[in-house]
Amino acid sequence: MSKPAKSEMKGAASAKPRNRVLPALDPTAFSLEGYMADDKTRVFNFNGRKLVSVLGREDFPGERIFKLPNKVVESANRQPLTAALLPCRLGYFPRAQGQRVSRANGDWAFTLLYCLDGAGTLDLREGKHRIPRGTFALLRPFEFHAYAADPSEPWSYYWIHFNGTVAQQYYDVLTNGGKDVCIAVQSDLRFVETFEKILAIYQEGHAYKNLVQASSAMHQMLGDLFGQIGHRSAPQESTTTRIDRTLTMMGKNLSTHVTIHELAATAGMSHAYFTQQFRKHTGQSPRSFFIQQKIAKAREYLAETDTKVENIARLVGYEDPFYFCRLFKRLTHQTPTMYRQSFRKTAAATRPNSRDE
């Protein structure tokens, strides 16, 4: 059989796949070294690759953390039962005021976050997400992410880092191939119980039987999460009720960014079906409706307060005040300053004259 021409080989090599899929970890080649460069920075050397995590946090009263020793993780990744799926680090942070984590190149393991109460924010390359109560976030390795407690409503949350030869498959089915990394679920104590079960198992030690038990519990948690996704569109709940739930979610999150995928998850619908039903019930797309709600709130601030325009922009979720002003003018045909002046002039003209009282 003749060998392909060099030009053909070069073309094939330069072609980029549409969806980058991480190869499964090779248990025989697994090597991990980690250390704390200082009390805020953790540095990993994973198979020659340097990963840095900035941990801006203090100790939280009631927190619990467990981390498998690196040598134990390396050994477990050479055993068939634990190489498939293994929780390596996990913990619980209650009322994590001021907490933040930033990983420019991601982590070497998959990261699962579960907000039990309050709220947090998640930054990814494609945008910023709010993580409210009852929401999971699933992050893949080696990709930028940063998350933090909401300043006014700091979250209480569980976190877990896991890896294994089937971890990528779980990630794909749970996030729709990486499109829906934030997963809103119904309140279910099973998730809390499973987090607590893994913590309890590891508190007993890290003998092989403990690792197998923890691996089994991790399978159970991800399986339960997948089951929740499959049953989100319960037939007994009307479409109107589910759309109304997303309207409430929008109203409560005017100061931040909420994606269509998050709204669809809240409604228990696919992205396409949710968009179709939302337009049917409101006459607008979800994005247009959300923007209109933000601008309506901005009008209230302009009419009722003396808050600066740039601060009002941030209050309705726009970090760029110039973009906010252009958007406001496009929708109202007035700049924010013109709207404020016009509103107050009209209000003054209609106010009863004190001499007539």
Image (spheres, rainbow, N blue to C red):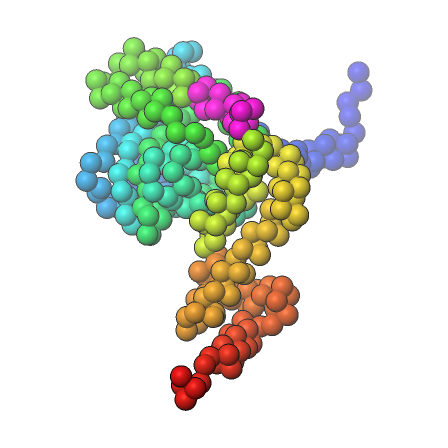
Q: In percent of the image, x 24 and y 20: which residue is there? A: 200
- Which of the pair 340/207 is nearer the observer? 340
User: Quarter of the image containing the N terminus?
Assistant: top right
- Which of the pair 61/47 is nearer the observer? 61
Q: Is residue 77 magenta?
A: no
Q: Is residue 231 magenta?
A: yes
Quarter location, residue 81: top left
Side (left or right) of 190 relative to 236: left
Q: Which residues are magenta?
A: 222-237
The location of residue 310, given as percent across then percent down, is: 47, 68
Q: In percent of the image, x 48 and y 44: which residue is there? A: 249
Quarter location, residue 106: top left
The location of residue 109, given as percent across then percent down, is: 42, 30
Q: Residue furthest front?
A: 357
Quarter location, residue 239: top right
Answer above or below: position of 264 versus 89.
Answer: below
The location of residue 79, given as percent across then percent down, is: 39, 12
Q: In percent of the image, x 28 and y 28: which residue is there? A: 67
Say whether residue 154 is visible.
Answer: yes
- Which of the pair 298/50 is nearer the observer? 298
Q: In percent of the image, x 38 and y 25: which residue is there? A: 188
The location of residue 329, given as percent across then percent down, is: 61, 68
User: Quarter of the image containing the C terminus?
Assistant: bottom left
